[in-house]
Image: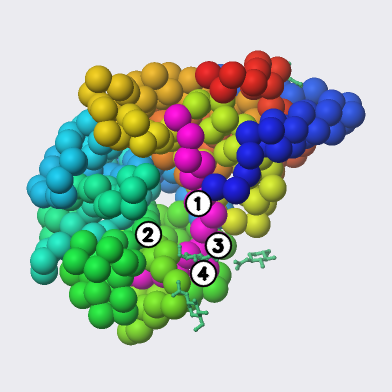
């Protein structure tokens, strides 16, 4: 991460000053759980009447960061639950609670393709753990779409080959593509107009599910799978850029500024995620675990609402340990309050307390 805190806070201050010079007053909207039906398993189908008209670019989806990391299936030395697991619910349970965007980090260890959580320690040694296998992820998505008609987007990024400690090569990606191509209800369509397809068109007005895998990888081709359920981050205009900090306020300012700058032209992922720092990785659970960082940070997620405007909003909000209704209710509040009210221009702002230099 090249951005320094000083420059980040400075940019944040300038941004607030610019917004202040604008006469429009920001409208305060709190997430409203009553804005949606009480059927989170089927919220897209249930809301198809008004959600169906929205293009992919206009929707906000609740997301799970490192969605495949709810249970350990292997890993390196020094890896423990407290520095590896990012979720408590498996993929199927996440989908049932309303999560529709799954962040997945593929690893290959031996011949097994799994979701993984790998990082280098300060000495350059890789520490990491493996989560659900891609076979089980595909099976759980298929189990869900068998009796639900929803849109599911799965992001495949930050691949890691355990034997070489390198990103996947083309051959490794091809093997993963073969596995995920067993997903039923894959969405097929042109690559370059993806963001303009409506939810109604994606799901045939709620008559079927649509599953899309978005692949972020340098110098890799999707081959015959391109447009057949698999799409590149480029065709999706995906913007997904997490900051490496354990301080909530730094994360918030960073993500809000990236949103102001990039959300208009991209499928923007707001990562409500703070990251363990090397000592926490080494000394958790005495120092903060991924879970305790998430428990401390997630209750403040609704602050995102203060930064959302009718034109600038996240397409996805991801978090670790998506256990309660927070992320889905905020995504739904964005869908219901802001997107349907397009005639009223609104300006977001970085709230006063975010200028606090301590970070949390
Ligand atoms: C989506 O449609 C808008 C307006 O019709 C157009 O300007 C834009 O280029 C399209 N974008 C994509 C990705 O197809
Ligand atoms: C299913 O498809 C039919 C025909 O296209 C359409 O009339 C209907 O609204 C769709 N949705 C549902 C939920 O049945
Ligand atoms: C897609 O992902 C790769 C790998 O992370 C990255 O290098 C590239 O910049 C991304 N492309 C776009 C358009 O975001
Ligand atoms: C991708 O290919 C280009 C051109 O061959 C090369 O310069 C670049 O280093 C490659 N990137 C990666 C991440 O392999
Ligand atoms: C600087 C500024 O305009 N701050 C506002 C941002 O939005 C929140 C919530 O709507 C207001 O309370 C702040 O006054």
Vertical arrangement, residue 150 with respect to residue 31, above or below = below
Residue 199 higher or lower than 290, as above or below: below
Q: Residue at x 16, y 49 (%)?
A: 76
- Contact between labelled residues 3 and 4, with CB atoms less than 8 Å apart: yes
Q: Which one is closest to the eye, mark 3 or mark 2?
A: 2
Determine which residue is flagged by label 3. 237
- Under circle 4, the secondary element is helix
Do the numbered discs 4 and 2 sit on residues whose CB atoms are within 8 Å? no
Mark 4–mark 3 Cα distance, whole angstroms, equals 5 Å
Disc 3 and disc 1: Cα gap in Å?
10 Å
Residue 154, percent from left and from top: 34, 55
Q: Label 4 neighbourhood size at 10 Å, few (<14), some (14-19), many (20+)?
A: some
The answer to whether residue 309 is seen in the rendering is no
**Residue 166 % position (x, y):** 31, 66
In terms of image quarters, where does ligand 5 lie? top right
* Residues marked 2 and 1 touching at CB (< 8 Å): yes
Where is residue 214, by image quadrant? bottom left
Instruction: Determine the secondary structure under disc 3.
Output: loop
Residue at image mark 2: 157
How packed is label 2: few (under 14 Cα within 10 Å), some, or many (20 or more)?
some
Residue occupying the point 30% across, 70% down: 168
Residue with the mark numbered 1: 240
Q: CA distance from mark 3 to mark 2?
A: 14 Å
Q: Which residues are magenta?
A: 229-246
Q: Is 232 on the left-hand or right-hand side of 229? A: right
Q: Determine which quarter of the picture holds residue 304.
A: top right
């Amino acid at each position: 991460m090249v951005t320094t805190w000083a420059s980040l806070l400075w940019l944040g201050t300038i941004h607030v000053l610019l917004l202040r010079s604008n006469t429009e007053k920001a409208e305060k909207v709190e997430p409203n759980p009553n804005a949606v039906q009480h059927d989170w398993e089927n919220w897209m189908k249930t809301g198809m009447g008004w959600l169906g008209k929205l293009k992919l670019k206009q929707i906000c989806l609740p997301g799970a960061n490192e969605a495949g990391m709810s249970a350990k299936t292997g890993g390196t030395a020094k890896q423990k639950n407290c520095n590896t697991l990012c979720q408590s619910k498996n993929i199927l349970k996440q989908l049932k609670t309303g999560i529709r965007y799954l962040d997945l980090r593929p690893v290959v260890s031996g011949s097994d393709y799994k979701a993984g959580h790998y990082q280098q320690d300060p000495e350059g040694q890789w520490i990491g753990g493996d989560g659900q296998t891609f076979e089980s992820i595909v099976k759980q998505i298929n189990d869900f779409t068998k009796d639900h008609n929803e849109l599911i987007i799965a992001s495949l990024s930050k691949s890691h080959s355990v034997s070489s400690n390198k990103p996947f090569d083309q051959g490794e990606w091809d093997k993963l593509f073969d596995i995920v191509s067993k997903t039923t209800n894959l969405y097929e369509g042109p690559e370059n107009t993806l963001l303009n397809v409506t939810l109604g068109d994606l799901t045939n007005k709620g008559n079927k599910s649509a599953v899309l895998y978005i692949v972020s990888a340098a110098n890799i081709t999707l081959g015959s799978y391109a447009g057949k359920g698999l799409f590149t981050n480029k065709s999706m205009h995906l913007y997904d850029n997490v900051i490496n900090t354990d301080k909530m306020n730094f994360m918030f300012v960073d993500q809000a500024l990236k949103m102001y700058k990039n959300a208009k032209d991209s499928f923007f992922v707001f990562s409500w995620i703070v990251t363990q720092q090397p000592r926490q990785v080494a000394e958790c659970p005495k120092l903060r675990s991924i879970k305790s960082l998430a428990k401390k940070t997630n209750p403040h997620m609704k602050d995102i609402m203060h930064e959302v405007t009718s034109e600038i909003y996240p397409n996805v909000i991801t978090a670790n340990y998506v256990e309660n209704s927070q992320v889905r209710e905020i995504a739904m509040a964005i869908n219901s309050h802001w997107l349907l009210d397009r005639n009223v221009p609104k300006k977001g702002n970085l709230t006063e307390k975010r200028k606090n230099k301590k970070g949390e």
